Amino acid sequence: MENIRIGTLVNGFDALRIIPQIKQYGFESYSLTFSHIEENVDLKEMATQLKGILQDTDAVISSVCVYSNPLSRDIGLRQQAIRSWEMLIEHAHHFGTDIVAGFTGRIEDETIDGCIPLFKEVFDPLASLAKDKNVRLAFENCEMGGNWERGNHNIAHTPDAWELIFEALPYEHVGLQWEPCHQMVKLIDPIAQLKTWLPKIFHLHGKDATVDWDIIKKHGINGPHKFAWDRTPGFGDTNWTTIISILRQHHYKGTIDIEGWHDPVYRDDWEMTGQVHALNYLKQCRGGRYIPNPK
């Protein structure tokens, strides 16, 4: 059984500075994140330097990601975002990964179903390019403060939206970048959802949540009181042993990369303390150290 790597997210433009400082802690993969990519960025050279940094480890680059808005009403921003997707698709193999992930984008304050025609127009060519390059596309499922009726940056944050998205792009190499947190803050059971959608899940973010049911029972979910918090794995409500067991039962071959910088407790000077705790916690949830059977 192939092991599921546990890693972390790193800002792509900071990766050459950050990864040499944190690789000692035992991260097994790194997901590189970008807001957008300018034409003059040499991704091939970046990949070459990262390979040199990681050559004394067994770690890999699990995915390269862009979180911008390729459906923006601003044509300049839209074109910049689309070009960023194209550049990552074209250069993913230099990083040793076949996953390019990011936001679908959203027409600002348009309904999700109202965005689907433009989504198909933008991503059909990107999906074709990805197929030519043997790349899989994975859409992140963060709502970015939006709902069905209005929002910004992303439409791929509810199962009903996923149905529309995969109807528009019915391709095996188009799927999801998933995490339990985004479900829990909408009071969706992430375990049930994982079981249903796992064939379309290509990459996992290691991010959890804590839901305060006392606040919900007293104040509901539409008042001024916050009822859910993003958490680093190991500090939230999710049973990650169950998640990893489901992944293994369905032969998931991707990674779980910790999405830090959200936890309300383990933050600022305690950020890396929380992330390394999450790293060790998730390794334990997958069964701890591998022990070979006796012969």
Image (cartoon, helix red, strand yellow):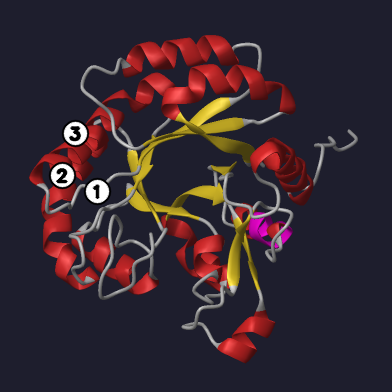
Residue beneath the point at 45% across and 58% down? 199
Q: Which residues are magenta?
A: 241-245
Sequence-wise first label, 2 or 3: 2
- Determine whether the residue tagged by mark 2 lies in a helix, strand or loop: helix
Q: Marks 2 and 1: in contact by CB < 8 Å?
A: yes
Residue beneath the point at 55% across and 26% down? 60
Sequence-wise first label, 3 or 1: 1
Q: Where residue 160 appears, x then y in whole percent?
A: 33, 74
Q: CA distance from mark 2 to mark 3?
A: 9 Å
Q: Where residue 54 appears, x then y in whole percent?
A: 58, 16
Is residue 2 among the parts visible in the rendering? no
- Determine whether the residue tagged by mark 3 lies in a helix, strand or loop: helix
Vertical comparison of 9 with 71: above or below: above
Of 181 and 109, which appears nearest the observer? 109
Vertical comparison of 61 with 85: above or below: above
Is residue 78 among the parts visible in the rendering? yes
Q: Where residue 109 appears, x then y in whole percent?
A: 21, 67
Q: Which residue is mark 1?
A: 69
Front label number (3 vs 1): 1
Tag 3: amino acid: Arg
Tag 1: amino acid: Asn
Residue sitting at the far front: 224
Vertical comparison of 16 with 271: above or below: above
Q: CA distance from mark 1 to mark 2?
A: 6 Å
Sequence-wise first label, 1 or 2: 1
**Quarter assignment of residue 53:** top right
Quadrant for the N terminus in the image: top right
